[in-house]
């Protein structure tokens, strides 16, 4: 019995270089995408914060809080849907061998759940991230991203259910 358990543990920890390569590629691309986003978010959130305040003088803490809320909203409602739909879901799906014509169905079935999980994990983290100097954000985000990638991997690696396939037939199913 003990030998069987040891063999099972050894099988569970087999290094898969292809899978590792997929994660590295996705991580490098994601790192480049998000490192660009923080500069964009700073600019947009500052401009929008000024528009919201309309020239009223407020305490610095209030202005910071408004800018932070705007930056988080921009990320969750603009950046994340775009990045997830065009990078985080399609790339690993395609690289894992799913035919290209099925990638849109994968995106459609997984995007909503990923955005909900994103809001749960990143809202609090981003309240901190958007208030540290821009040059330190990538380090802060990378630290939190270790946990987040486990969440993303669990969602994007799941097979879509038969119910999802029935609701969203592929073009070959529609023709039949």
Image (cartoon, rainbow, N blue to C red):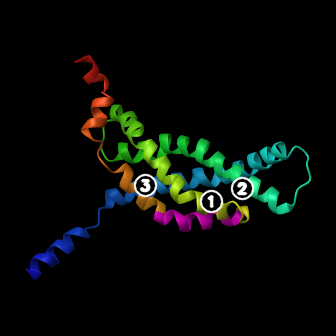
Q: How far apart are marks 3 and 1 (CA)?
A: 17 Å
Q: Give the range drawn in magenta.
A: 135-147
- Give the secondary structure at mark 2: helix
C-alpha gap between disc 2 and disc 1:
8 Å
- Looking at the image, residue 98 lies above or below residue 151: above
- Residues at circles 2 and 3 in contact by the CB criterion of under 8 Å: no
Q: Residue 126 carries which label?
A: 1
Which residue lies at the image location 51% right of the left edge and 53% below the top edge? 118
Q: What residue is shown with label 3?
A: 152
Of label 2 and label 3, which has the lower sequence position?
2
The residue carrying pointer 2 sits among few (fewer than 14), some (14 to 19) or many (20 or more) residues within 10 Å by Cα, namely: many
Neighbour tally class for label 1: few under 14, some 14-19, many 20 plus, Cα within 10 Å: many
Mark 2 and 1 residues: CB-CB less than 8 Å, in contact? yes
Rate crowding at label 3 as few (under 14), some (14 to 19) or many (20 or more) other CA atoms within 10 Å.
many
Identified at 58% across, 53% down, the residue is 32
User: For mark 2, what is the residue?
Assistant: 68
């Amino acid at each position: 019995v003990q030998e069987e358990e040891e063999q099972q543990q050894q099988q569970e920890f087999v290094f898969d270089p292809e899978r590792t390569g997929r994660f590295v590629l996705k991580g490098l691309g994601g790192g480049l995408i998000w490192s660009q986003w923080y500069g964009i978010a700073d600019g947009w959130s500052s401009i929008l914060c000024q528009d919201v305040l309309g020239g009223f003088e407020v305490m610095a803490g209030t202005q910071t809080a408004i800018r932070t809320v705007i930056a988080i909203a921009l990320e969750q409602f603009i950046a994340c849907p775009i990045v997830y739909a065009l990078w985080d879901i399609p790339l690993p799906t395609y690289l894992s061998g799913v035919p290209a014509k099925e990638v849109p169905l994968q995106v459609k079935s997984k995007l909503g759940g990923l955005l909900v999980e994103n809001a749960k994990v990143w809202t609090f983290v981003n309240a901190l991230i958007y208030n540290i100097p821009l040059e330190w954000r990538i380090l802060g985000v990378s630290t939190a991203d270790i946990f987040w990638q486990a969440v993303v991997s669990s969602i994007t690696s799941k097979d879509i259910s038969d119910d999802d396939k029935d609701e969203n037939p592929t073009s070959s199913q529609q023709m039949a």
